[in-house]
Image (spheres, helix red, strand yellow):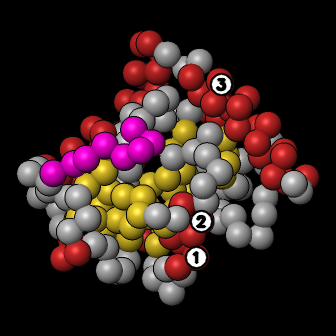
């Protein structure tokens, strides 16, 4: 195994414990701050031009952004909300609505049914990404499956603004990175 792989593996354990340590009212306040900042970010000039929001369904100790997803679903804005589904070694995003059927993945994550006509087909998009750790310059440590990096590599011709959401406890000075690791253009910290 190469050194970067081992560094990331060890750091994942540590950062997962740190993220799990953000609890109770303290966590609720931080998540509320993140949701408010996400909603405010929709007014940024570059994000205003986006038609699609590529978000995620939180699981475990990930930042609880479900209220933001609900805001997008129930707003009168023109945004379409897409959530990810792992399909083999890759991840695809599918448009969801209030009546979208969701199923539980092998990872325990609620995912939309893979209906071909609802698959994201490109277009200017704002992608919100979970993670275990981030640096101020946008480096991200995920869970090691590379799903977001593969998705972004497969869609590099499309305009996707990437945004990591995190608790300030997840911010670190440096992270080991590989050539295939994508950088988050924005960070929203609570």
Dot 1, how many residues are within 10 Å of its Cα: few (below 14), some (14-19), or many (20+)?
Answer: some
Q: Taking 51 as reference, is 141 left or right?
A: right
Question: Residue 65 sits in which quadrant?
Answer: top left
Measuring from the top left, give residue 40's x and y in whole percent.
36, 49
Q: Is any atom of residue 170 visible in this view? A: yes
Measuring from the top left, give residue 38's x and y in whole percent.
39, 48
Q: Residue at x 55, y 39 (%)?
A: 166
Measuring from the top left, give residue 110's x and y in whole percent.
31, 44
CA distance separating discs 1 and 2: 6 Å
Circle 2 residue: 149
Circle 1 residue: 153
Q: Earlier in the sequence, mark 3 or mark 2?
A: 3
Local SS, label 2: helix
Residue 18 badge: 3
The residue nearer to you, when weighing 117 against 190, is 117
CA distance separating discs 1 and 3: 29 Å
The residue nearer to you, when weighing 93 against 108, is 108
Q: Residue at x 48, y 35 (%)?
A: 62
Q: Main secondary structure of the magenta part?
A: loop
Measuring from the top left, give residue 46's x and y in whole percent.
43, 71
Stretch of the chain drawn in magenta = 101-108
Dot 2, how many residues are within 10 Å of its Cα: few (below 14), some (14-19), or many (20+)?
Answer: some
Is 103 a magenta residue?
yes
Local SS, label 3: helix
Q: Quadrant of the N terminus?
A: bottom right
Q: Residue at x 47, y 21 (%)?
A: 27
Q: Is any atom of residue 43 visible in this view? A: no
Dot 3, how many residues are within 10 Å of its Cα: few (below 14), some (14-19), or many (20+)?
Answer: some
Question: Residue 18 sits in which quadrant?
Answer: top right
Callouts 1 and 2 close, C-beta under 8 Å: yes
In the image, which is nearer the foreground, mark 3 or mark 2?
2
Q: Taking 157 as reference, is 108 left or right?
A: left
């Amino acid at each position: 195994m190469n050194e970067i792989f081992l560094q990331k593996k060890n750091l994942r354990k540590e950062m997962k414990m740190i993220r799990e340590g953000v609890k109770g009212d303290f966590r609720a306040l931080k998540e509320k701050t993140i949701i408010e900042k996400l909603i405010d970010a929709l007014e940024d000039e570059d994000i205003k031009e986006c038609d699609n929001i590529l978000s995620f369904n939180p699981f475990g100790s990930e930042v609880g952004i479900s209220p933001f997803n609900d805001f997008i679903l129930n707003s009168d804005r023109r945004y379409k909300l897409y959530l990810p589904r792992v399909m083999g070694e890759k991840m695809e995003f599918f448009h969801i609505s209030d009546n979208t059927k969701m199923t539980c993945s092998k990872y325990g994550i609620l995912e939309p049914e893979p209906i071909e006509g609802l698959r994201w087909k490109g277009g200017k998009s704002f992608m919100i990404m979970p993670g275990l750790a981030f640096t101020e310059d946008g480096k991200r440590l995920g869970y090691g499956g590379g799903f977001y990096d593969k998705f972004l590599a497969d869609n590099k011709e499309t305009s996707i603004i990437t945004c990591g959401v995190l608790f300030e406890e997840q911010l670190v000075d440096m992270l080991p990175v590989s050539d295939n690791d994508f950088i988050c253009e924005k960070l929203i910290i609570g």
